[in-house]
Amino acid sequence: MTTELAEKSVAADTGSMMIEVHRLTKQYGDFRALDTVDLSIRKGEFVTLLGPSGSGKSTLLNLISGMTSPTSGRVVINGVDATDMPTNKRGLGMVFQNYALMPHMTVFENIAFPLQVRGMKKAEIETRVAEVLKLIQLENVANRRPRALSGGQQQRISLARCIVYNPSIILMDEPLGALDKKLREDMQLEIKRLHAELGVTMLYVTHDQDEALTMSDRIVLMRNGRIEQQGSPETLYFKPDTVFSADFIGSSNLFQGRLEGEGDTVTLTAGKDRLAVELRSEAAVGPGDEAVVLIRPENLHIADGAIPEGTNVVTATLLDTVVLGGVVRHFLRTEDGRQLVAQVLNRSDRARPKRGAPVQLYWQVGESRLLKADPTFSKQ
Amino acid sequence: MSSGDSYLSKRAGGMLIAPLFVLLLVFFVYPLLLTVWQSVYENGFTTRPYEELLTSTLFAKVLRTTFDISFTATMVSLFVGYPVALHLSRQPPGRRVFYLMLVMLPFWTSILVKSFALTVLLGHAGIVNQILGYLSGDTLHVTMVFNRFGAIVGMINYLLPFMILSILGSLLAQDPNLARAAQVMGAGAFRIFRKITLPLSMPGVIGGVIINFTLSIGMYITPALLGGRKDMMVANLVDFYTRQTLDWPLAAAIAVVLLVISGVLVALLGRVRGGSGTMGAMA
């Protein structure tokens, strides 16, 4: 009954939805690679599937591309039920980590391939290939073999081969995984630029949280075959719903303990520290429950004189300081052995605390976030 | 990079291959040189055997027959072997090992045994003809041994594993993402085969063809046992001159000619292999 209703409501708003996945499950023997996942992607949206290896993100991508078929559930592409449609009828584009360019074809022949499949005239193919080579700023390599090009160039050719036939959706399976850091950052911007220029829907798979934060309109964080949390990069960074989300995206300082007290602000006891936290109804924890409080490194301050009102204070020893260009990271340890990270902007005129020195750390109660304790998750 | 990096010194490595080297020297290189020597020495240096071969119509005919049979056998082996290799390449690794054992089975059986087994199968009173006779009401009998058909069937039985392994190698070396990418781009199975799988498997095809042809032109027992009287191959001609006419210099000259042809083919194979090796490394 409920699924029937869900299917009906889906049919009603398919107009703006490019991909819809309903209760999709993929079982390999005893292992459930994907577990009743629901996901909708709007036209023109840039969605990233983020998660550790084995979280189900590649399985989900393969089910959408049709390279594997689901154990149960439906895949709807552009309003059409594509669950049983063969891959080559789905009208998709895909970019692979290892580029997957045909080694026996020239760059021109590679990009022309999908157009030939579509039965396009020779003259038109030539114009289209030239256009798309110009778009990726690789006009001079048309007659070269892919292997004569650098990794970054090959990946741009593989992007060109994808956008040349205007697929409604482009799937990307860790496309920048084989490139070095600098090139990866350039390519991230290039892909973002193409996405903005072409207005194409993109579904991007990565295990790199920085990449996901940089590129996405929406991040879908996956864990053990399920969606842990989805939302904008800001939401996932500042408002994680779970300990896993908090830990996977960005760095985090986590204190776990039992909640006590009454009212909106309660006390969490973690080892020797008693910390004030604001209750949140969505966190679904209250006095008596085991909970976790999250403080992002940029909200954890090292006391330098008077400590402001409305803060929690803990004492720690400075273990190490790392300068990362514009920011400085301080690694600290509390008396009961808890590792903490504090991050400040780098200023040439500011004296830094000495290594081994005891320091007072504080944070605004409002800048921490209360999360439900997760017995299946341990940071260490 | 340098030999100093390997944990065996050059000298120790040399010691390890020394026994094999001596064995080959005594039982392979020496007889080979002896054969070459015999073809040019009859109470002094001579070119008589080679001159005789140049003008011999028998040799020309046998050489043509040899090429003819070898070419046919190689082509049949290619067209039978390619689908098998393609099928094998698409199996999960465990099952592929099992199927490969089946492919290799004829390899582990003596050529003599196989040839007699084929006579039993294909002979006039063989199983195949019995079935044909039963089905056709005793009107249909096909002569399948002691003619060219029999020779080729017997040869293919021996040649197929070489063809299949060579093609399989170049099929397995292909990046499976290529076919996936083509599929996503909308290409159907036939187009993917024609435009991607087949062209990328050409090094394996050419390699298999050269190996098969080289093996074919030197074949002796199989065509002798299963072939017809008219289908004399070069190796059988060597046998004829050695045992029937006792013209050993002529027999040696034929052997040398065969050796040179095989040598050229093997050299060609090396070039194909080199090419496929670099292609594999680039992919």
Image (cartoon, coloured by chain):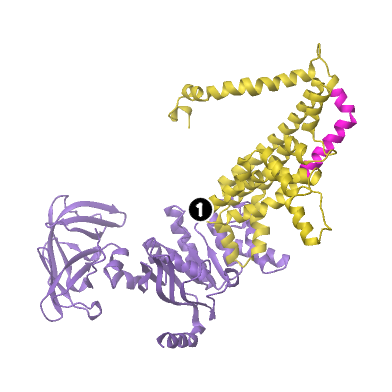
Number of labels in the image equals: 1
x, y percentage for residue B57? 90, 31
Residue B232 in the image: above or below residue A335: above
Please identify which colour was used for chain B in the image: yellow
Determine the residue positioned at 19% across, 63% down.
A301
Q: Give A238 or B120, whichever is nearer the viewer.
A: B120
Would residue A109 be found to the left or right of residue A354 on screen?
Answer: right
Residue B238 percent coordinates (x, y): 79, 28
Residue range of the region highlighted in magenta in the rendering: B50-71
- The answer to whether A13 is drawn above or below residue A214 in the figure is below
Image position of B144 (left or right of B58) = left
Chain in purple colour: A
Q: Which residue is pictured at 20% across the width and 59% down the height?
A: A340
Q: Position of residue A337 (x, y in %)?
A: 15, 56
Q: Residue B159 sits in which quadrant?
A: top right
**What residue would you read off at disc 1?**
B94
Residue B63 counted in the magenta span: yes
Residue A135 seen in this snapshot: no
Amino acid under disc 1: Gly
